[in-house]
Amino acid sequence: MSDDIRWVSATTLDDLWEGDLLDVEVEGENVMLVNLVDGGGVKAYQGMCPHQEILLADGKWDPDTNVLLCHGHNWEFDLRSGNGLNPTGCRLYEYPVRVEESDVLVGIPQDGQRHHLRHEVP
């Protein structure tokens, strides 16, 4: 993967409060932003479920456990790490993210590839 990253303003903290999820499009890619509770900070993940490309931000998120349940087929993800909980063995692509004052910037790698992972069925 290329080390060249383009930093793009995706939203502000006024629109992404602690405990919120937000679906945004950044440089043509679906990105899900999450502002974790208890000082966990902002994370940016692929916006589509790796199973059937359903918007993850439409799922049910429990901010106390940081578990997101995709409404398509009940796949579960830990939004602290992006790891799949059910099923295990998959994970969400995580974009670099930084907050400058109140602006939330997402780093889009400039490697010419789509940045979402697909679950591989054995």
Image: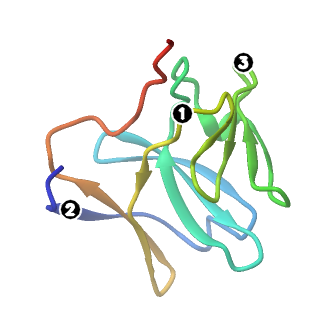
User: What is the secondary structure assignment of the residue under circle 1?
Assistant: loop
Q: How is the image coloured?
A: rainbow
The mark that comes first in sequence, 3 or 2, is: 2
The mark that comes first in sequence, 2 or 1, is: 2
**Amino acid identity at mark 2:** Ile
Residue labelled with disc 2:
5
Residue labelled with disc 3:
73
Between 27 and 82, the one nearer to me in the picture: 82
Q: Residue 105: which quarter of the image?
A: bottom left
Cα separation between marks 3 and 2: 33 Å
Badge 3 vs badge 2, beta-carbon distance below 8 Å: no
Q: Is residue 60 above or below residue 16?
A: above
Q: Which residue appears at 72% of the width and 70% of the height? A: 18
Cα separation between marks 1 and 3: 15 Å
Residue labelled with disc 1:
90
**Amino acid identity at mark 3:** His
Q: Which residue appears at 65% of the width and 53% of the height? A: 79
- Label 2 vs label 1, nearer the camera: 1
Q: Is residue 100 above or below residue 13?
A: below
Q: Which residue appears at 75% of the width and 70% of the height? A: 37
